[in-house]
Image: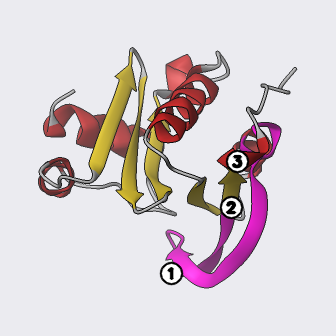
Amino acid sequence: MSPDDLAELHALCFDFAPRPWSAGEFRSLLDSANVALLSVGGGFVLTQLLGDEAEILTIAVHPEHRRRGIAAGLLLRVHENARESGINSVFLEVSERNTGAIGLYESLGYERAGARKGYYRDRNGNRITAVVMKRDLTKGKAELLVK
Protein backbone atom coordinates (compact mmCIF):
# COMPACT_ATOMS: atom_id res chain seq x y z
CA MET A 1 0.00 0.00 0.00
CA SER A 2 1.24 3.47 -0.81
CA PRO A 3 1.30 6.29 1.76
CA ASP A 4 -1.74 7.75 -0.01
CA ASP A 5 -3.60 4.44 0.28
CA LEU A 6 -2.67 4.14 3.95
CA ALA A 7 -3.85 7.68 4.70
CA GLU A 8 -7.12 7.11 2.85
CA LEU A 9 -7.89 3.92 4.77
CA HIS A 10 -6.76 5.46 8.07
CA ALA A 11 -9.17 8.38 7.51
CA LEU A 12 -12.04 5.92 7.01
CA CYS A 13 -11.20 4.26 10.31
CA PHE A 14 -10.24 7.16 12.55
CA ASP A 15 -12.00 10.48 12.45
CA PHE A 16 -10.83 11.20 16.01
CA ALA A 17 -9.07 9.38 18.87
CA PRO A 18 -6.66 9.16 17.19
CA ARG A 19 -6.97 11.63 14.39
CA PRO A 20 -6.32 10.32 10.86
CA TRP A 21 -2.71 10.47 9.69
CA SER A 22 -1.66 12.17 6.47
CA ALA A 23 0.12 10.55 3.54
CA GLY A 24 3.19 12.60 4.49
CA GLU A 25 3.16 11.17 8.01
CA PHE A 26 2.90 7.63 6.64
CA ARG A 27 5.68 8.34 4.12
CA SER A 28 7.95 9.58 6.91
CA LEU A 29 7.25 6.53 9.06
CA LEU A 30 7.81 4.12 6.18
CA ASP A 31 11.17 5.78 5.52
CA SER A 32 12.29 4.83 9.05
CA ALA A 33 14.53 1.78 9.24
CA ASN A 34 12.76 0.43 12.33
CA VAL A 35 9.16 0.64 11.05
CA ALA A 36 7.43 -2.33 9.42
CA LEU A 37 4.20 -2.43 7.44
CA LEU A 38 2.02 -5.52 7.04
CA SER A 39 -1.01 -5.21 4.81
CA VAL A 40 -3.72 -7.47 3.47
CA GLY A 41 -6.81 -6.70 1.45
CA GLY A 42 -8.83 -4.36 3.59
CA GLY A 43 -6.34 -3.68 6.36
CA PHE A 44 -2.86 -2.90 7.58
CA VAL A 45 -0.74 -2.65 10.71
CA LEU A 46 2.28 -0.40 11.19
CA THR A 47 4.82 -1.49 13.80
CA GLN A 48 7.92 0.16 15.22
CA LEU A 49 10.74 -2.05 16.50
CA LEU A 50 12.70 -0.70 19.47
CA GLY A 51 15.36 -3.04 20.89
CA ASP A 52 13.58 -6.11 22.23
CA GLU A 53 10.17 -4.40 22.10
CA ALA A 54 7.72 -3.53 19.36
CA GLU A 55 5.00 -0.92 19.33
CA ILE A 56 1.87 -1.11 17.23
CA LEU A 57 1.74 2.43 15.85
CA THR A 58 -1.63 1.93 14.18
CA ILE A 59 -3.86 -0.79 12.84
CA ALA A 60 -6.76 -0.16 10.48
CA VAL A 61 -9.35 -2.35 8.79
CA HIS A 62 -11.77 -0.94 6.22
CA PRO A 63 -15.23 -0.63 7.81
CA GLU A 64 -16.71 -2.94 5.14
CA HIS A 65 -14.20 -5.68 6.02
CA ARG A 66 -14.47 -5.65 9.80
CA ARG A 67 -15.40 -8.64 11.97
CA ARG A 68 -13.76 -11.06 9.52
CA GLY A 69 -10.57 -11.70 11.49
CA ILE A 70 -8.35 -9.34 9.48
CA ALA A 71 -7.09 -7.36 12.49
CA ALA A 72 -6.49 -10.53 14.50
CA GLY A 73 -4.62 -12.10 11.60
CA LEU A 74 -2.44 -9.04 11.17
CA LEU A 75 -1.60 -8.96 14.88
CA LEU A 76 -0.78 -12.67 14.96
CA ARG A 77 1.60 -12.12 12.03
CA VAL A 78 3.19 -9.21 13.91
CA HIS A 79 3.69 -11.53 16.89
CA GLU A 80 5.29 -14.23 14.73
CA ASN A 81 7.59 -11.78 12.95
CA ALA A 82 8.51 -10.12 16.24
CA ARG A 83 9.44 -13.43 17.88
CA GLU A 84 11.62 -14.30 14.89
CA SER A 85 13.37 -10.93 15.32
CA GLY A 86 14.06 -11.45 19.03
CA ILE A 87 11.28 -9.16 20.23
CA ASN A 88 9.99 -10.03 23.72
CA SER A 89 6.94 -7.79 24.00
CA VAL A 90 4.52 -5.73 21.94
CA PHE A 91 2.85 -2.54 23.16
CA LEU A 92 -0.05 -0.52 21.83
CA GLU A 93 -2.36 2.31 22.84
CA VAL A 94 -6.10 2.32 22.32
CA SER A 95 -8.86 4.74 23.19
CA GLU A 96 -10.68 3.67 26.32
CA ARG A 97 -13.87 4.15 24.29
CA ASN A 98 -12.86 1.54 21.71
CA THR A 99 -14.20 -1.45 23.61
CA GLY A 100 -14.30 -3.66 20.51
CA ALA A 101 -10.57 -3.22 19.91
CA ILE A 102 -9.78 -3.70 23.60
CA GLY A 103 -11.70 -6.98 23.53
CA LEU A 104 -9.76 -8.13 20.48
CA TYR A 105 -6.42 -7.25 22.05
CA GLU A 106 -7.32 -9.04 25.28
CA SER A 107 -8.36 -12.14 23.28
CA LEU A 108 -4.84 -12.16 21.80
CA GLY A 109 -3.14 -12.05 25.20
CA TYR A 110 -2.66 -8.32 25.64
CA GLU A 111 -2.94 -7.03 29.18
CA ARG A 112 -3.54 -3.53 30.43
CA ALA A 113 -0.21 -2.00 31.37
CA GLY A 114 -1.21 1.58 32.12
CA ALA A 115 -3.10 4.61 30.91
CA ARG A 116 -2.35 7.97 29.36
CA LYS A 117 -5.00 10.36 30.62
CA GLY A 118 -6.13 12.90 28.07
CA TYR A 119 -3.96 11.40 25.32
CA TYR A 120 -6.63 11.74 22.63
CA ARG A 121 -9.30 14.36 21.95
CA ASP A 122 -12.77 13.75 20.59
CA ARG A 123 -14.56 15.94 18.04
CA ASN A 124 -15.68 18.32 20.80
CA GLY A 125 -12.19 18.74 22.23
CA ASN A 126 -12.86 16.51 25.23
CA ARG A 127 -9.88 14.51 26.44
CA ILE A 128 -9.94 10.71 26.12
CA THR A 129 -7.71 8.32 28.02
CA ALA A 130 -5.51 5.93 26.06
CA VAL A 131 -5.21 2.45 27.50
CA VAL A 132 -1.66 1.12 27.19
CA MET A 133 -1.62 -2.62 26.53
CA LYS A 134 1.23 -5.12 26.44
CA ARG A 135 1.58 -8.60 24.96
CA ASP A 136 4.44 -10.61 26.46
CA LEU A 137 5.74 -12.80 23.63
CA THR A 138 7.90 -14.92 25.95
CA LYS A 139 4.81 -16.59 27.45
CA GLY A 140 4.12 -18.66 24.35
CA LYS A 141 1.82 -18.15 21.43
CA ALA A 142 -1.58 -16.62 22.00
CA GLU A 143 -4.42 -18.45 20.36
CA LEU A 144 -7.29 -16.49 19.00
CA LEU A 145 -10.03 -16.63 21.62
CA VAL A 146 -12.58 -14.58 19.70
CA LYS A 147 -15.81 -16.46 19.04
Question: What is the magenta segment's predominant secondary structure?
Answer: strand
Q: Is residue 128 left or right of residue 14?
A: right
The quarter of the picture where residue 37 lies is: top left
Location of the N terminus by quadrant is: top left
**Is 120 a magenta residue?**
yes
In three-dimensional space, the C-alpha distance between marks 3 and 2, rounded to whole angstroms, equals 16 Å
Query: Looking at the image, which residue is at 35% across and 54% down?
Result: 20
**x and y percentages locating residue 101 in the rendered image:** 69, 45
Q: Amino acid at mark 1?
A: Gly
In three-dimensional space, the C-alpha distance between marks 1 and 3, rounded to whole angstroms, equals 39 Å
Q: Amino acid at mark 3?
A: Thr
Mark 1 vs mark 3: which is more N-terminal? Answer: 1
Give the residue pinned by disc 2: 133
Q: From the viewer's perspective, is residue 69 above or below residue 36?
A: above
Mark 3 vs mark 2: which is more N-terminal? Answer: 2
Can I make out residue 126 in this image?
Answer: no
Q: How many marks?
A: 3
Q: Amino acid at mark 2?
A: Met
Q: Nearer the viewer, mark 1 or mark 3?
A: 3
Location of the C terminus by quadrant is: top right
* Nearer to me, 15 or 2: 2
**x and y percentages locating residue 110 in the rendered image:** 74, 50
Query: Looking at the image, which residue is at 17% across and 55% down?
Result: 32
Q: Is residue 12 left or right of residue 53?
A: left
Give the residue pinned by disc 3: 138
Give the residue pinned by disc 1: 125
Query: Looking at the image, which residue is at 74% across and 70% down?
Result: 113
Can I make out residue 93 in this image?
Answer: yes
